[in-house]
Image (cartoon, rainbow, N blue to C red):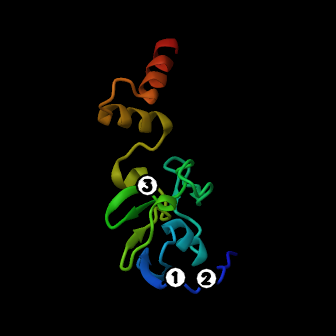
Amino acid sequence: MFRRRTDGGRHAVGILVDGVRVEARAGDSVAAAMLAAGHVTCRRTPVSGSPRAPYCLMGVCFDCLVTIDGIGNRQGCMTQVRDGMQVETGSAGPPSPGASGADLSPPGLVSAHMLQCESMNCALRFVYCSAIRFA
Protein backbone atom coordinates (compact mmCIF):
# COMPACT_ATOMS: atom_id res chain seq x y z
CA MET A 1 0.00 0.00 0.00
CA PHE A 2 2.74 2.46 0.96
CA ARG A 3 6.17 2.54 -0.61
CA ARG A 4 9.23 4.32 0.73
CA ARG A 5 11.14 6.85 -1.25
CA THR A 6 14.78 6.02 -1.47
CA ASP A 7 16.85 8.25 0.75
CA GLY A 8 20.14 6.60 1.47
CA GLY A 9 21.23 9.02 4.17
CA ARG A 10 19.04 7.66 6.97
CA HIS A 11 20.03 4.50 8.82
CA ALA A 12 17.65 1.68 9.72
CA VAL A 13 16.33 1.24 13.25
CA GLY A 14 14.29 -1.64 14.64
CA ILE A 15 11.09 -1.20 16.63
CA LEU A 16 8.59 -3.73 17.94
CA VAL A 17 4.95 -3.26 16.95
CA ASP A 18 2.70 -5.60 18.94
CA GLY A 19 5.72 -7.85 19.46
CA VAL A 20 6.68 -8.00 15.76
CA ARG A 21 10.00 -6.47 14.69
CA VAL A 22 9.58 -3.67 12.15
CA GLU A 23 12.35 -1.91 10.26
CA ALA A 24 12.05 1.86 10.27
CA ARG A 25 14.33 4.71 9.25
CA ALA A 26 15.83 7.23 11.64
CA GLY A 27 13.61 10.30 11.60
CA ASP A 28 10.40 8.40 10.79
CA SER A 29 7.40 8.96 12.97
CA VAL A 30 5.95 5.87 14.63
CA ALA A 31 2.83 6.22 12.45
CA ALA A 32 4.87 6.45 9.24
CA ALA A 33 6.97 3.43 10.22
CA MET A 34 3.83 1.42 10.98
CA LEU A 35 2.19 2.36 7.68
CA ALA A 36 5.35 1.55 5.72
CA ALA A 37 5.46 -1.87 7.38
CA GLY A 38 1.80 -2.58 6.62
CA HIS A 39 0.45 -2.05 10.15
CA VAL A 40 -2.54 0.14 9.35
CA THR A 41 -4.71 -0.07 12.48
CA CYS A 42 -3.43 1.89 15.49
CA ARG A 43 -6.41 1.54 17.78
CA ARG A 44 -10.10 0.70 17.94
CA THR A 45 -12.87 2.98 19.11
CA PRO A 46 -14.03 2.26 22.66
CA VAL A 47 -17.75 1.96 21.87
CA SER A 48 -18.06 0.15 18.53
CA GLY A 49 -14.57 -1.31 18.18
CA SER A 50 -14.14 0.24 14.72
CA PRO A 51 -10.50 0.22 13.57
CA ARG A 52 -8.76 3.59 13.33
CA ALA A 53 -5.67 4.41 11.29
CA PRO A 54 -3.43 7.48 11.09
CA TYR A 55 -5.37 10.14 9.23
CA CYS A 56 -3.87 13.62 9.35
CA LEU A 57 -0.26 12.68 10.29
CA MET A 58 0.22 16.12 11.85
CA GLY A 59 -1.15 15.79 15.39
CA VAL A 60 -4.69 17.02 14.89
CA CYS A 61 -7.00 13.99 14.63
CA PHE A 62 -5.71 11.64 17.40
CA ASP A 63 -6.52 8.53 15.34
CA CYS A 64 -2.92 7.33 15.65
CA LEU A 65 -2.93 6.85 19.44
CA VAL A 66 -0.68 3.98 20.54
CA THR A 67 1.16 2.85 23.64
CA ILE A 68 4.90 3.56 23.37
CA ASP A 69 7.29 1.95 25.84
CA GLY A 70 4.42 1.40 28.27
CA ILE A 71 3.04 4.95 28.11
CA GLY A 72 -0.46 5.00 26.66
CA ASN A 73 -2.27 7.48 24.42
CA ARG A 74 0.82 8.71 22.59
CA GLN A 75 0.33 10.22 19.15
CA GLY A 76 2.26 8.00 16.76
CA CYS A 77 2.48 10.74 14.16
CA MET A 78 4.23 13.10 16.58
CA THR A 79 6.76 10.65 18.02
CA GLN A 80 9.99 9.75 16.23
CA VAL A 81 11.13 6.14 16.25
CA ARG A 82 14.23 5.07 18.10
CA ASP A 83 15.97 1.74 18.10
CA GLY A 84 14.33 -0.81 20.41
CA MET A 85 11.12 1.17 20.89
CA GLN A 86 8.10 -0.97 21.82
CA VAL A 87 4.79 0.06 20.31
CA GLU A 88 1.47 -1.50 21.23
CA THR A 89 -1.63 -0.79 19.21
CA GLY A 90 -5.13 -0.99 20.55
CA SER A 91 -6.15 -3.08 17.58
CA ALA A 92 -7.30 -5.99 19.72
CA GLY A 93 -10.55 -4.10 20.27
CA PRO A 94 -12.34 -2.86 23.33
CA PRO A 95 -12.65 -5.06 26.39
CA SER A 96 -15.88 -6.99 26.52
CA PRO A 97 -18.28 -5.71 29.17
CA GLY A 98 -18.80 -9.21 30.58
CA ALA A 99 -15.09 -9.84 31.08
CA SER A 100 -14.19 -6.61 32.85
CA GLY A 101 -17.49 -5.44 34.23
CA ALA A 102 -17.04 -2.20 32.27
CA ASP A 103 -20.08 -0.46 30.84
CA LEU A 104 -19.06 0.51 27.30
CA SER A 105 -22.36 2.12 26.34
CA PRO A 106 -22.09 5.88 25.79
CA PRO A 107 -23.80 6.70 29.13
CA GLY A 108 -21.48 4.23 30.88
CA LEU A 109 -18.40 5.82 29.33
CA VAL A 110 -19.58 9.30 30.26
CA SER A 111 -20.36 8.36 33.86
CA ALA A 112 -16.97 6.62 34.17
CA HIS A 113 -15.34 9.81 32.88
CA MET A 114 -17.28 11.89 35.40
CA LEU A 115 -15.92 9.79 38.26
CA GLN A 116 -12.32 10.30 37.12
CA CYS A 117 -12.42 13.82 35.66
CA GLU A 118 -10.87 16.45 37.91
CA SER A 119 -11.70 19.46 35.75
CA MET A 120 -14.83 21.42 36.55
CA ASN A 121 -14.55 23.08 33.12
CA CYS A 122 -14.57 19.82 31.18
CA ALA A 123 -16.63 20.00 27.97
CA LEU A 124 -17.89 16.46 28.48
CA ARG A 125 -19.05 17.35 32.00
CA PHE A 126 -20.95 20.34 30.59
CA VAL A 127 -22.65 18.28 27.88
CA TYR A 128 -23.50 15.47 30.30
CA CYS A 129 -24.92 17.79 32.96
CA SER A 130 -26.89 19.74 30.34
CA ALA A 131 -28.37 16.52 28.96
CA ILE A 132 -29.48 15.44 32.45
CA ARG A 133 -30.93 18.86 33.24
CA PHE A 134 -33.00 19.01 30.03
CA ALA A 135 -33.97 15.35 29.80
Residue 68 to residue 63: above or below: below
Q: Name the residue at 45% across, 29% down.
A: 124
Q: On the image, numbered disc 2 is attached to which residue?
A: 7
Residue 73 to residue 26: above or below: above
Residue 9 to residue 69: above or below: below
> Which amino acid type corresponds to the residue marked 1 in the rendered image?
Arg
Q: On the image, numbered disc 3 is attached to which residue?
A: 96
Q: On the image, numbered disc 1 is attached to which residue?
A: 10
Which residue is situated farthest in the front direction here?
9
Q: Position of residue 96 (x, y in %)?
A: 43, 54
Q: Which of the pair 36/81 is nearer the observer?
A: 81
> Which amino acid type corresponds to the residue marked 3 in the rendered image?
Ser
Left or right of 16 in this view: 25: right
Q: Name the residue at 43% across, 20% down.
A: 129
Q: Name the residue at 62% across, 56% down.
A: 55
Q: Which of the pair 115/135 is nearer the observer?
A: 115
> Which amino acid type corresponds to the residue marked 2 in the rendered image?
Asp
